[in-house]
Image (cartoon, grey):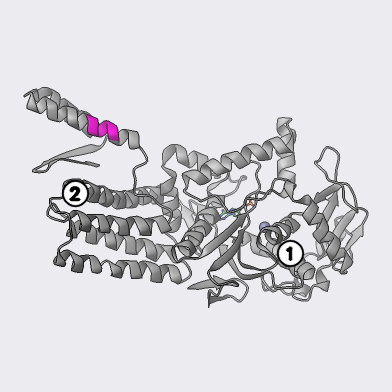
Amino acid sequence: MKLYNTLTKRKEDFVPLEEGKVKMYVCGPTVYNFIHIGNARPMIVFDTVRRYFEYKGYDVNYVSNFTDVDDKIIKKANEEGVSSDEISKRYIAECKKDMEGMNVKPATTHPLATEEIGGMIEMIRVLVEKGYAYEKNGTVYFRTRRFQDYGKLSHKNLDDLRSGERSLLVTGEDEKEDPLDFVLWKPKKEGEPSWESPWSDGRPGWHIECSEMSKKYLGEQIDIHAGGEDLVFPHHENEIAQSEAANGKEFAKYWMHNAFLNIDNRKMSKSLGNFRTVREISEQYDLQILRFFMLSAHYRSPLNFSADLMEASKNGLERIVNAADSLKFLMGNAKTEEMTEEEKTAYAKTEEYVKAFEDAMEDDFNTADAVAAVFDLVKYSNTTANEDSSKEFLQKLLERLVTLMDVLGLTVDRKEEMLDEEIEKLIEERQAARKAKDFARADAIRDELLEKGIILKDTREGVQWKRA
Ligand code: AMP
Ligand code: ZN
């Protein structure tokens, strides 16, 4: 399995630290609002990475934090006149609802920054003790130049960084030894949440939280650390500096970063007013469609969100779900149980699509090509399965489709189970009406279903239905 490592700028073979296990950490959202569709991209992409590892038999320990102490949360709390805690708890709950809608599995652990302050203080203490950090007026800074490898992830040169950050010297932060130094701990301001520490009553900087939570839940060394590409610098660069300075070991072996999601070919931002939350999308579409849309591109390619592309994703997913529906329907009416020799050969041919799917995933998780392999399987199923197929053959085809879709975190089951039942009930009623020669009623039912996008087909085996 190959994956692109930001650290080495190359695709590398994945070799786990411990055989059969994957330890991965994915930086989670800051919770001061509903998550937007940009935030959904790393969630979906890295959940799919996790699912593929699991499909390959790895035991995955997946940790993703919620940043629940931050300036933006405090600002929102002040605006609403409630506590920061109330804001973060509310949006964590909302985020989990969106994740469920997108079929993003809950992490093995979802740590909260506010519950891990003690560990962060301890890590900062070690950094101070080792000479990698220093305190000035209650603030603790990381001594960036002291860490020899600084810049290795973002491939930045310290002197270039220094000239870029020179302006800091004139903005009142001149208590720092060096403009490159960054905050590990800061004293509280009036009305802010705070914790006691050896340096001041205050709160941790953002970067230290991931270094600490990754260490606590996964250990000092992990296989994969991931997030959106905007996190490479400074967040992940600073995490490496903190963790490697404190632990004296290489922090993460592989660093994976997803490219950005744009909207109508523009950067999504509050100032442009083109910000879309996952919740808004869910009012219009099943969130599975959003997931399918995200996976239609490679995770390292920028992706553009537009109404047209969402419609195309909706149709694409529908094609797959229809194929599964058709297999289920045929199974219910199959005349024979076991596969014939001919069917065994036909089924063996589907190995090709599984191989194409796996080859795509093994090549740095190329989900676009993996989706193409699923479409090939669907096409094969549509042309091979028919009323004369055995139940076993149909079932195996369906299982194959379901397995690959599950790796992508997509289900072929229609969400509206109730609706299916309603349809079936109406079809039964229509059959009864026909039997009683009440053709007007039978036709009325057919029209009613058609209005809801359900097309009926009378076959020798009974009534088949599908969604338009
Ligand atoms: P934040 O809450 O801003 O820390 O973001 C949480 C995660 O979402 C991080 O991994 C970000 O890199 C990622 N992210 C934010 N905006 C976008 C976007 N427009 N496209 C892709 N990923 C994003
Ligand atoms: Zn992080």
Name the dominant secondary structure of the magenta segment.
helix
Which residue is painted at 71% across and 42% down in the image?
Answer: 73
Residue 144 vs residue 434: left or right?
Answer: right
- In this view of the protein, can residue 266 be seen by the observer? no
Q: What kind of residue is marked 2?
A: Leu
Please tell me whether mark 2 sits on a helix, a strand or a loop: helix
Residue range in magenta is 421-425
* Residue furthest to the left: 437
The quarter in which the C terminus is drawn is top left
276 to 3, vertically: above or below? above
Residue denoted by label 1: 238
How packed mark 1 is, by other alpha carbons closer than 10 Å (few <14, some 14-19, many 20 or more), is many
Give the spatial CA distance, label 2 vs label 1. Answer: 57 Å
Which residue is painted at 47% across and 43% down in the image?
Answer: 101
Q: Position of residue 442 (x, y in %)?
A: 13, 27
Please tell me whether mark 1 sits on a helix, a strand or a loop: helix
- In this view of the protein, can residue 238 be seen by the observer? yes
Residue 227 vs residue 150: left or right?
Answer: left
Residue denoted by label 2: 330
Q: What kind of residue is marked 1?
A: Asn
Task: Indicate which disc residue 71 carries.
Answer: none
Viewer-side residue, 239 vs 180: 239
How packed mark 2 is, by other alpha carbons closer than 10 Å (few <14, some 14-19, many 20 or more), is many
* Residue furthest to the right: 137
Which residue is painted at 51% across and 40% down in the image?
Answer: 279
The question of residue 6 being in magenta is answered with no
Do residues under tags 2 and 1 come within 8 Å of each other at their CB atoms?
Answer: no
Residue 216 vs residue 401: left or right?
Answer: right
Quarter-of-image position of residue 415: top left
